[in-house]
Image (cartoon, rainbow, N blue to C red):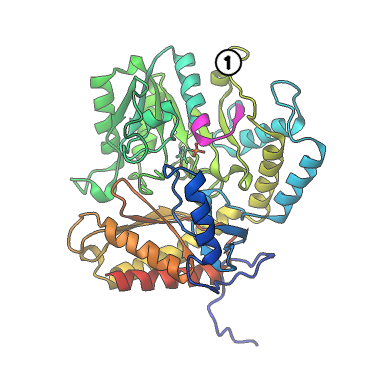
Amino acid sequence: MAVELTTPSVLPTLATRLSQRRDLVTEVPGPESRNLHDRRTSVVPRGVISSLPVYAADADGGIIRDVDGNSFVDLGSGIAVTNVGASAPTVVAAIREQAEHFTHTCFMVSPYESYIRVAEELAELTPGNHAKRSVLFNSGAEAVENAVKIARLTTGRQAVVVFDHAYHGRTNLTMALTAKTMPYKSNFGPFAPEIYRMPMSYPYREENPNLTGAEAALRAIDQIEKQIGADSTAAILIEPIQGEGGFIVPAPGFLPTLADWARSNGVVFIADEVQSGFCRTGAWFASEHEGVVPDLITMAKGIAGGMPLSAVTGRAELLDAVHPGGLGGTYGGNPIACAAALASIDVMREHDLSGRARAIEALVMGRLRALSDDLGGEQGPIGDVRGRGAMIALELVKPGTRKPDPEITKAVASACLAEGVLLLTCGTFGNVIRLLPPLVIDEELLLDGLDVLEAAIRAAH
Ligand SMILES: *Cc1c(COP(=O)(O)O)cnc(C)c1O
């Protein structure tokens, strides 16, 4: 009988084109990246920033290869977009096949089947078994804008409730919906009216650590009733797990209590799952973890393997209330993006990427919690480890306090980059390291990335 000598791997290995190994062959950034950066500064404004100074040449599985031939471990997925990888073969084939027939006709001019198939998939995959309709757009912000349009039209009310630390996009309406001023809103006003911001459930930073999710929801509901009135409230818009705001997972009970109140008061409950959707959190949608059935759900990032596509899916009676011509856009539901979405959804299903995300959670959480304990637990630099599935964050603080430490956060991210690990930061206070590996990442590569992160945190501490 064979004796098992090593820990059995929990993530089945998937075939890849690029070798899934971290490999630095030049300094970082290398000469080609530096050259591109010089050219960029003469033609691209500084308002568009890049988190990382290396320019991509190729990407596959959990690897991004730069123009100097360096291979980096990708722990960002282009902000939770390439859940199925950045060049999944079946997605690439679907894109190529569609492009050889037509790149665009405009669904509002001469429609095509793939748009309908995406809508059929979304009706099946999103929470709830009521009749649903879906409308497709290009970006997350566009989906959120349209969800608000639909909620206002169907309720005949104007007020939209959003939360502290929320991120919903950069267009005029979605800037107003977003919480953080710098860099998203500063000096870009005036902003859209009738937006009301309520306190979020943020367990790590709650003044009363025993506050339950239901109590945190009632705190917000009390403010809604006092400041707006239920009968003036069109919608509650919330990320089930906040993304840019710091991967904030509300206390259990928070989302269901808000959703129940919305239902009882004729308020449309909109889940913004642009970042948390498509297997990222270990389920098709993060709302499912607490059995929440949103009236409308906005989706984008992970939907189409990197192609620009977004959607609003929701109750048929809400979407059908909009007059003909009231929803749409030239590129919305582009046929190549639809083909990529259908192929990506197949990959998610076939390889059970939700199950993979849960296995990634078990691996990563175990490692990070052990590291946190080893560095002093609550008294150490890692104030909080949180998240679900492959959407995991470390909140870094000055040891012995809850004071955010954005400097150490930046130092850790740069140290990882220098060692060949690409990771992103986030959070209202700039002190959160977020891990968003492609869900297809190779187990050894992921563990290698975690080793580098651990060493960087120990060194910076
Ligand atoms: C990224 C994001 C958006 C905006 O999506 P874009 O495609 O960048 O417009 C909206 N909501 C959430 C939760 C996001 O993470």
Quarter holding the C terminus is bottom left
Quarter holding the N terminus is bottom right
Cβ of mark 1 under 8 A from ligand 1 = no
Q: For this view, does 103 lie left or right of residue 289?
A: right
Q: Residue at x 54, y 43 (%)?
A: 301
Q: Indicate the position of residue 218 as horizontal and vertical percent values.
A: 27, 32
Q: Secondary structure at mark 1?
A: loop
Q: Indicate the position of residue 172 as horizontal and vertical percent values.
A: 42, 27
Residue furthest to the front in view is 42
Label 1: how many Cα within 10 Å (few below 14, some 14–19, many 20+)? few
Q: Is residue 332 magenta?
A: no
Between 143 and 173, the residue placed more toward the observer is 173
Between 2 and 242, the residue placed more toward the observer is 242
Magenta range is 133-143
Q: Residue at x 33, y 18 (%)?
A: 230
Q: Indicate the position of residue 335 as horizontal and vertical percent values.
A: 71, 35
Q: For this view, does 49 lie left or right of residue 351?
A: left
Between 214 and 200, the residue placed more toward the observer is 200
Q: How many marks?
A: 1
Between 344 and 431, the residue placed more toward the observer is 431
Q: For this view, does 4 lie left or right of residue 334?
A: left
- The residue tagged 1 is 326
Q: Residue at x 67, y 39 (%)?
A: 337
Q: Indicate the position of residue 460 as horizontal and vertical percent values.
A: 30, 69
**Amino acid at the residue labelled 1:** Gly
Figure quadrant of residue 163: top left
Figure quadrant of residue 428: top left
Figure quadrant of residue 257: top left
Q: Say above or below: 358 vs 207.
A: below
